[in-house]
Image (tube, rainbow, N blue to C red):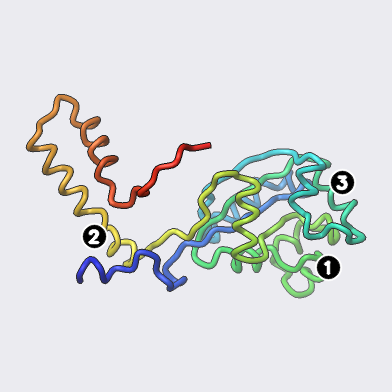
Amino acid sequence: MDDTDVPLFPEAPAVTVEQTLAIIKPDAIHFADEIVEEIKSRGFTITQKRRLRLSPEQATDFYAEHYGKMFFPSLIAFMHSDDILVLVLAKPGAVQEWREMIGPTHPNKARQLSPESLRARYGTDQTRNAVHGSDSYFGAEREIRFMFPGTVTEPVYGGQLARDYLQAKVNPVLVQGLTQLCKQKPEDPVTWLAEWLLQNNPNKPLVEEPLT
């Protein structure tokens, strides 16, 4: 396989690890350990995790799409009432699988249609429904960045595609660097190699902008 044959940004979603946002709400925070264990048992990887209490302003910004609806004031008051646990979950098809795991929005409907779901078991009503899940891939991107500013939310490549990418794009650079390291024999090989990789990174931007 020629280097140019390896897709740098592949189209097939089946080989990516997707991310979604999960929130354990105030009414279920005392069951957080149980819920987290169940999440792990379903094959999700928890890539980020934080416990916090939202301010009314933060809750309003997070649920801005519901502004003006009858339940909006009670939703904001509830989400501000106690701590929440926020998680970034990763696995193939994470958004849809997490939505299926938590069940329908209203716990009564969840108990009818999906009795094993988290909302069916831990929720009380449409507001106090135990957990939150992003409703789409793009919704997950926005929510993850809201709760974890600066997070990269692009899918992570896995399987054979990742191996092909490493073989074509990463390994040749490492081999070249290690070859130069053996020739140069610097006193501090780790620092020398790190600096060499920074200078010879094939993916570094053409114009470097300062971080703000």
Residue 78 percent location from the top left of the image: 84, 47
Q: Residue at x 63, y 66 (%)?
A: 136
Q: Which residue is mark 1?
A: 108
Q: Residues within 10 Å of mark 2 (few under 14, many from 20)?
A: some
Q: Which label was assigned to residue 77?
A: 3
Q: Residues within 10 Å of mark 3 (few under 14, many from 20)?
A: some
Q: Which label was assigned to residue 67?
A: none
Residue type marked 1: Asn
Q: Which residue is mark 2?
A: 167
Tell me if 10 is positioned left or right of 24 in this view: left
Q: Residue at x 51, y 54 (%)?
A: 45
Q: Residue at x 26, y 57 (%)?
A: 169
Q: Which is nearer the N-term, disc 1 or disc 2?
A: 1
Are the residues flagged by discs 3 and 1 in contact, CB closer than 8 Å?
no
Residue type marked 3: Ala
Q: Residues within 10 Å of mark 1 (few under 14, many from 20)?
A: some
